[in-house]
Image (tube, rainbow, N blue to C red):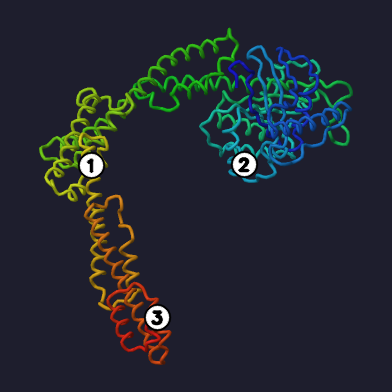
């Protein structure tokens, strides 16, 4: 809400059915006679920008009010306010008066009455319901009918007694202005030319006389609950004059001459302003002293949000307005100063706690500085130093100021990293010239220092180790081939020879790492297997040849045997011996063929 927008007060009506609530609300929305002190009341129409639910409630209140106004204008009584769903209607009015600036009133219709008296028969139960509403409203208007004669009206005596007992049970620390509206005051007095002060005096005298004891008890119970300053009794009339028909009051013909309707609302708003001003005074006084700023209510924005609108609720020339501004000046600078002091205290507390943790964490650095510190211990120190040196400039303020600057932390990181690098390379040097053992160590070195001073040498060691392992695998493969060749039985067949030849002719596991000696060994194995295979094939071919030759001889097919000998190539020693024997044994006519 803007600081200069009209203040909206939430006021509630309480009254039994028939106490005049509907007539008063409708009369407030109709043209009223001039108020003797210049007060005015205007009806505020529904606001489409107020939200869907609130606008619907305002529209419902507008529709109900229009119907009630129409009936009053005809001289008829409006329908009683029915008990419907809570918050079903919202009624809004604007008021002006000499003593306070323009303000607005918002009335909520809870089931036809703000507090439904038909639902509460026990004083404690009614007191509980009232207490709940007193914490959410700015003021309460209690409506009771003016009695027609001395002794009160028997129809409302029980309800008034119940309400008085409820106020006697009610206990609250919150100040709430409660106006007791004695409605239908035209029953007790002719109001055509009556003065407000005179009628107020008449009502006070009536209550003080004890002529209507239940009404007097209700006034006293309200005073005892919220205090004398927060209680005031008002004689009001929606009609200003009435006629009786069938035992009921009806408005007189012509325009309504409502009496005193604006006064209770203006008093409730003015009293609410005074209460809030007193609250501000007490709050400002409570904030004095060193520990006052610890109260969350004294924090600047909370304080400002509660009281920023208060100056606009008083006339600029009024002493109340001057008092509010003075109180604001008293609190504005101290509140800001204490908030700054509080913020500095919190920051100092946080930094102090952080400084304590820094001292504890710095112990890892001290351990790493010891001679012979292990690599894991030095690593732990480097991790903390890196977090420390790269933290926000506002972090570690105390420790950075007197123990360890961020520049020193970065220098220690470089020192520790160099030491770890040396510690990780020294075992590599001790393993020389065993390349494989060196390779096991340089992996950890390169993982931690991929760009370290020995990184190139470490990668060379890894390459040499890979080459050595590759050559060893090649040797193992050749050993297996040579073993397979040696393991061949003397009478190995062609299939077995081909299998061994395939294995021997396959490329080594690492061709790019094959040495000249390994290539020579592989070629020799392949050549031997090929020679053995050729020899075996020749042997098998000779055996097959002899088999066919001997079959020809056995069947005396000498001509076919002679032709077989003649076609056989090459002519080696075995073939020449066989031919010589055939010529010696064969007839003359076959010999020329051989």
| Residue 165 at least partly seen | no
Disc 3, disc 1: CB below 8 Å? no
At horizontal 34% and vertical 69% (from top left) the residue drawn is 499
Say which quarter of the image contains residue 530: bottom left
Image: 91 above or below 584: above
Q: Secondary structure at mark 1?
A: helix
Dot placed on the residue nearer the N-terminal end, 3 or 1? 1
Say which quadrant the C terminus sits in: bottom left
Disc ID at residue 438: none
**What percent of the width, then of the height, locates residue 150?**
73, 32
- Distance from disc 3 to disc 2, alpha carbons, whole Å, reads 148 Å
Say which quarter of the image contains residue 79: top right
Which residue position holds label 3?
Answer: 593
Give 384 or 117, whichever is nearer the viewer. 384
Which residue position holds label 1?
Answer: 460
Count neighbours of disc 1 (C-alpha within 10 A) and say few if under 14, some if 14 to 19, many if 20 or more: some
- Distance from disc 2 to disc 1, alpha carbons, whole Å, reads 94 Å
Image: 142 above or below 330: below
Which residue position holds label 2?
Answer: 126
Q: Nearer the viewer, mark 3 or mark 1?
A: 3
Count neighbours of disc 2 (C-alpha within 10 A) and say few if under 14, some if 14 to 19, many if 20 or more: many
**What percent of the width, then of the height, locates residue 414?**
21, 30
**Residue at the outermost front position:** 588
């Amino acid at each position: 809400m803007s600081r200069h927008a009209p203040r909206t007060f939430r006021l509630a009506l309480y009254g039994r059915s028939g106490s005049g609530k509907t007539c008063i609300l409708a009369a407030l929305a109709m043209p009223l006679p001039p108020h003797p002190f210049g007060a005015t009341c205007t009806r505020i129409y529904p606001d489409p920008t107020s939200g869907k639910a609130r606008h619907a409630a305002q529209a419902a209140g507008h529709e109900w009010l229009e119907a009630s106004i129409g009936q009053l204008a005809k001289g008829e009584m409006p329908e009683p306010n029915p008990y419907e769903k809570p918050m079903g209607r919202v009624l809004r009015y604007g008021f002006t008066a000499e003593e306070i600036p323009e303000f607005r009133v918002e009335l909520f219709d809870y089931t036809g009455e703000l507090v439904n008296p038909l639902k509460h028969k026990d004083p404690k139960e009614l007191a509980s319901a009232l207490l709940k509403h007193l914490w959410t409203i700015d003021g309460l208007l209690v409506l009771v009918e003016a009695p027609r004669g001395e002794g009160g009206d028997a129809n409302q005596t029980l309800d008034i007694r119940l309400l008085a007992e409820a106020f006697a049970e009610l206990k609250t620390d919150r100040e709430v202005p409660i106006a007791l509206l004695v409605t239908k005051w035209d029953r007790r007095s002719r109001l055509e030319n009556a003065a407000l002060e005179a009628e107020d005096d008449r009502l006070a005298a009536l209550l003080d006389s004890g002529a209507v004891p239940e009404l007097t008890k209700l006034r006293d119970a309200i005073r005892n609950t919220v205090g004398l300053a927060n209680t005031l009794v008002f004689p009001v009339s929606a009609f200003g004059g009435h006629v009786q028909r069938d035992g009921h009051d009806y408005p007189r013909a012509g325009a309504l001459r409502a009496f005193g309707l604006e006064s209770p609302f203006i008093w409730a708003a003015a009293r609410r302003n005074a209460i809030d001003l007193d609250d501000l005074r007490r709050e400002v006084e409570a904030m004095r002293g060193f520990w006052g700023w610890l109260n969350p209510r004294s924090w600047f924005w909370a304080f400002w949000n509660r009281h920023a609108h208060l100056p606009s609720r008083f006339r600029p020339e009024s002493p109340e307005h001057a008092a509010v501004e003075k109180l604001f000046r008293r609190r504005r600078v101290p509140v800001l100063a204490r908030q700054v002091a509080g913020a500095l205290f919190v920051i100092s507390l946080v930094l102090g706690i952080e400084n304590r943790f820094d001292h504890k964490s710095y112990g890892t650095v001290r351990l790493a500085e010891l001679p012979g510190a292990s690599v894991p211990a030095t690593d732990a120190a480097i991790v903390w130093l890196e977090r420390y040196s790269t933290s926000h400039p506002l972090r570690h303020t105390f420790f950075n100021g007197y123990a360890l600057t961020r520049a020193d932390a970065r220098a220690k990181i470089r020192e520790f990293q160099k030491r770890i690098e040396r510690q990780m390379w020294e075992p590599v040097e001790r393993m020389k010239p065993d390349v494989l053992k060196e390779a096991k160590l340089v992996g950890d070195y390169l993982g931690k220092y991929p760009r370290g001073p020995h990184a190139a040498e470490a990668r060379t060691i890894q390459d040499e180790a890979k080459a050595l392992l590759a050559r060893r695998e090649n040797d193992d493969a050749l050993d297996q081939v040579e073993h397979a060749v040696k393991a061949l039985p003397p009478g190995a067949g062609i299939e077995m020879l081909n299998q061994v030849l395939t294995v021997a002719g396959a490329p080594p596991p690492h061709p790019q790492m094959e040495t000249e000696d390994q290539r020579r060994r592989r070629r020799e194995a392949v050549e031997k297997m090929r020679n053995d295979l050729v020899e075996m094939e020749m042997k098998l071919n000779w055996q097959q040849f002899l088999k066919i030759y001997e079959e020809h001889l056995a069947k005396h097919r000498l001509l076919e045997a002679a032709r077989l000998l003649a076609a056989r190539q090459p002519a080696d020693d075995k073939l020449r011996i066989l031919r010589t024997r055939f010529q010696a044994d064969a007839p003359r006519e076959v010999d020329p063929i051989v």
